[in-house]
Structure formats: C-alpha cells, structure tokens
Amino acid sequence: MAVESGVGEIMFCNSMLMIKKKLTFVCFIIMTAMLMTACKLIPEDVIGDISTNTLIMNEDGSVREICCDDFSGVSFDYSGLKNKIKSDVADYCQSYGEDSIKLLKYKEDDGIIKVALDYKSLDDYNKFNGTSYRLDDASEISKQMKLKDNQGNDITAGDIILDGYKVICIDGKLSLIINGEIMYYNSHVTSIDGKDKALLDGEGYGVIIYK
C-alpha cells in the first residue's frame, strides 16, 4: 500500500506540474497578444522632436520627408493648407499609383506647422516637389571634385576608391538622414552629425558619399 501511495503521489505531482506548464504557456500567449494589440493602438510618432526640414533615405529606396514651417504671428489658413496637401497627394496618387505618396501626419502648434510624408521613391519625391535630387553610384562623380572625409580632412575624389559607394546630390537647405555611413561630402554640406546625418546649406548641390 505504501508503494501504491508513493506512486500515486508522484503521478499527482507530475499532473500538477503539467497543468502549471500549460497555464504558464497560455498566460504567455495572452500577454503577447495584449502587447501586440497595445502596440497597434499606439500611433507611431513619425515626427518626434524634428524641428527642421528633413529628408530620411530608407534602405528600400523610399523617402520620408518632414516639413517644418513657422507661421506664428501671421494670419494663415491652416485648415486650407492641410486640405491642399491632401488634395495634391490624392491627385498625384491617382496619376502615379495609390502608394506613391502617403500623408502620415499634419500637425499645427502655435503657428508651427509640421508635415510628414512618405514617398515610394526619390523619383516620386522629385516629381511631386519639382526638384532634381539624384541618387547614383559614387563612381560616376567627377574625379576632380573636392571633398572632405568624415574626419574633416580635405581630399580629391580621384584619390579614393569609390566602388560600391552611393552618392546623393541635393540642392535644398535641409537635414539629410541616410541609411548607411557618411564617408565623404562636399562644401555645401555644412556639418555631419554622427555617421548618418548631414546638414546642407542649400546654396548649391550638396554631395554626400556613403556606404
């Protein structure tokens, strides 16, 4: 009888252990589902603390634009501007494809307007904004171009090997964030911040070479 009792106790303990494991797994699944649902309910802050005109070049070739304008102290039709942007985006998408441009956010705070837009490609950005920014293979640039490396040293393009690097040319006054590491830049880039952010003066084509 003692043996049977011992076996029963062991079976009972094993059964309880299996139940605890199943309950733990179920709780894990429920918590995961709740967290995923909560994440979907929290909207992405696509603008964050950006306060200057900014272009973000994504790895897949898409472009995110954050426009920042100060209309404080000026009589301005804010709702009219928002409607105009929506209308322009809708017209462009009708002509070039539904996913060509997306208006992510329009924000107005004490006369400061910030707009976030996603473009499917740099070509879509150029068509919509009437610009001619370029993204090319860095080996295409002039060998005589004067550059600085990311340590601030002067260098000539012909003295460096640029195979496998990319170059972006922009003539706007803005901040540029690239998906990669900035290696060289020309005189129209006033500064670089970290490895992936540059400030352009807008007084000519800023050239940024990166990998």
Image: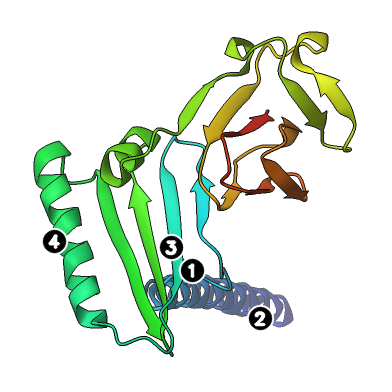
Q: For residue 131, which quarter of the picture?
A: top left
Q: Which residue is the site of mark 2?
A: 9
Q: Which percent across, then down, holds residue 174? A: 56, 53
The amino acid pointed to by label 1 is Ile
The residue at which mark 1 appears reads as: 47
CA distance separating discs 2 and 1: 61 Å
For discs 2 and 3, the disc positioned in front in the rendered view: 3
Helix, strand or loop status at disc 1: loop
Which of the marked residues, 3 or 1, is nearer the chain's N terminus?
1
Q: Residues within 10 Å of mark 3 (few under 14, many from 20)?
A: some
- The mark found on residue 87 in the picture is 4
How many neighbours does mark 2 have within 10 angstroms: few (below 14), some (14-19), or many (20 or more)?
few
Q: Return the residue at label 3.
A: 67
Tell me what residue is drawn at x 31 percent, y 41 percent. Answer: 130
Q: Which amino acid does label 3 sit on?
A: Cys
Q: Is mark 4 on a helix, strand or loop?
A: helix
The Cα atoms of the two marked residues, 1 and 4, are separated by 21 Å
When the figure is inspected, residue 16 is found, relative to residue 202, above or below; the finding is below
Task: Look at 37% across and 78% down and name the residue there.
Answer: 107
